[in-house]
Image (cartoon, rainbow, N blue to C red):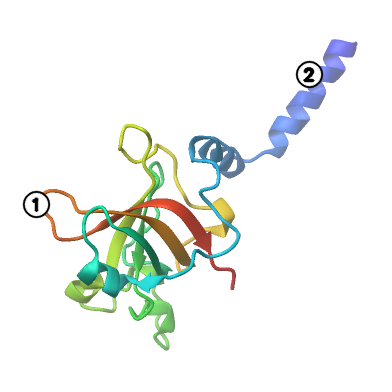
Amino acid sequence: MRILMTLMLVVVLVSGCNKEDLKLQAAEQLLPAGLFVTSPPSGAVDVVAARTTAKDGDEIVIKGQVAGAKEPLAANRAIMTIADLSLPTCDKTPNDACKTPWDACCEPTDDIARKSLSVQVVGPDGRPIKAGLGGNSGLAPLKQVVVAGTVKIPSGSTAPVIEAKRIYVVSN
């Protein structure tokens, strides 16, 4: 009887969790402790400034919003696209019924490229961690963020990638 009641309790508890909660819990276990912080790192520059002045290996703090792509938060990797706050997203366009306003599809693609960059959280192997960032500390498309990390410029590219050490999600 005791075993049956224990099993019933386990079934009730497990059925109370949804898949998104379980995915978020799994991601939290893979991401570094202290990645998401409760106060913004100081000295932030905007994305456009970072793209024009950052050099490989620089420590940097940038501010922007999760935007600039149809899926700015990778589902299975700790990678996100952030855009300069000056990039108009479609939610700011009157009478625009865009289902993904964060992709800024109403703007020229060269402007989107010039005003956005990738942020990733890497593991000891130097590769992006196999866990999504979305949902952690409320991180979602169109959320403003302040990210502290290290600039990496991939071979053959001029676009910097930020390897995040701390991420602050602005609550609005």
Identify the residue at the far left of this view. Answer: 156
Three-letter amino acid code at the position of disc 2: Leu
Nearer to us in this view, 93 or 111: 111
Q: Nearer the viewer, residue 65 or 36?
A: 36
Most foreground residue, 133 or 3:
133
Between circles 2 and 1, the one closer to the viewer is 1
Pointer 2: what residue? 7
CA separation in Å, label 2 and label 1: 57 Å
Instruction: Determine whether, in the image, residue 157 is placed left or right of residue 119.
Output: left
Vertical placement of residue 29 versus 67, above or below: above
* Res. 156 mark: 1
Reply above or below: 141 against 77: below
Which residue type does callout 1 highlight?
Answer: Gly
Disc 1 is placed on an element classified as loop
- Quadrant of the drawing holding the N terminus: top right
* SS class, disc 2: helix
Q: Which disc, if any, is residue 145?
A: none
